[in-house]
Image (cartoon, rainbow, N blue to C red):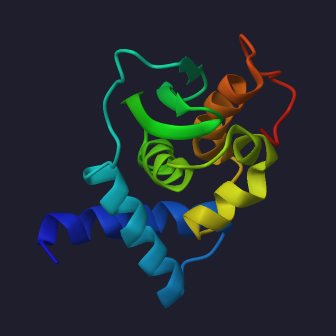
Amino acid sequence: MRSGRRTKLDALTRIMGKARGMSIISPMEDLYMEQILDHYQDPRNFGKIPDADLSHEEGNPSCGDLIRIDIKLDGDRIKDIKFSGKGCAISQASSSMLTERLMGARLEDVKAMGKEDILQMLGIPIGPMRIKCALLPLKVVKVEAYGLDAWNEDDEEA
């Protein structure tokens, strides 16, 4: 592993450990943090779809994350999905991982997803300060799946 990558992973480990009130991270959590760092540094499905059937952008004003997700449909299935925007490692990795997971999925599958699906996908405990970062891409695709203009801010579950 490159030393720069190890330094970033160590920093992410410290952040997550502090969020959990711990100083020790399990080997499994370390593996998931490497996966998050990989998706952050080399995001999958990053870009825009010019002729998207669905497109929505949301931001998180508390931390400055901004995520846009474009979807091209084939019937009710996601034929192509891309995200763009900026933000912290958690929001960007969550966006990358979610777009991979949703490729080929039905809009009903998107509607059925919730907070626990995202947390399980990320594989590490997410502290209260980062939960909105992790859930932002889910919020964006749910707005698209339901055909809304915006998501109810009171719905923390996305």
**Residue farthest to the right, as pictured:** 154
User: In the depicted view, which residue is nearer to us: 130 or 36?
Assistant: 36
Relative side of 5 to 45, left or right: left
**Residue farthest to the left, as pictured:** 2
Relative side of 32 to 60, left or right: left
- Image quadrant where residue 58 sits: top right
User: In the depicted view, which residue is nearer to us: 106 or 126?
Assistant: 106
Task: Count the labels in the image.
Answer: 0
User: In the depicted view, which residue is nearer to us: 69 or 30?
Assistant: 69
Q: List x then y, in percent, for residue 27.
A: 48, 89
Q: Residue at x 54, y 78 (%)?
A: 23
- Establish if 7 lies above or below 23: above
- Establish if 25 lies above or below 71: below
Q: Residue at x 71, y 32 (%)?
A: 142
Quadrant of the image containing the N terminus: bottom left
Q: Residue at x 56, y 21 (%)?
A: 59
Residue 75 in sight: yes
Residue 86 in sight: no
**Residue farthest to the top, as pictured:** 149
Quadrant of the image containing the C terminus: top right
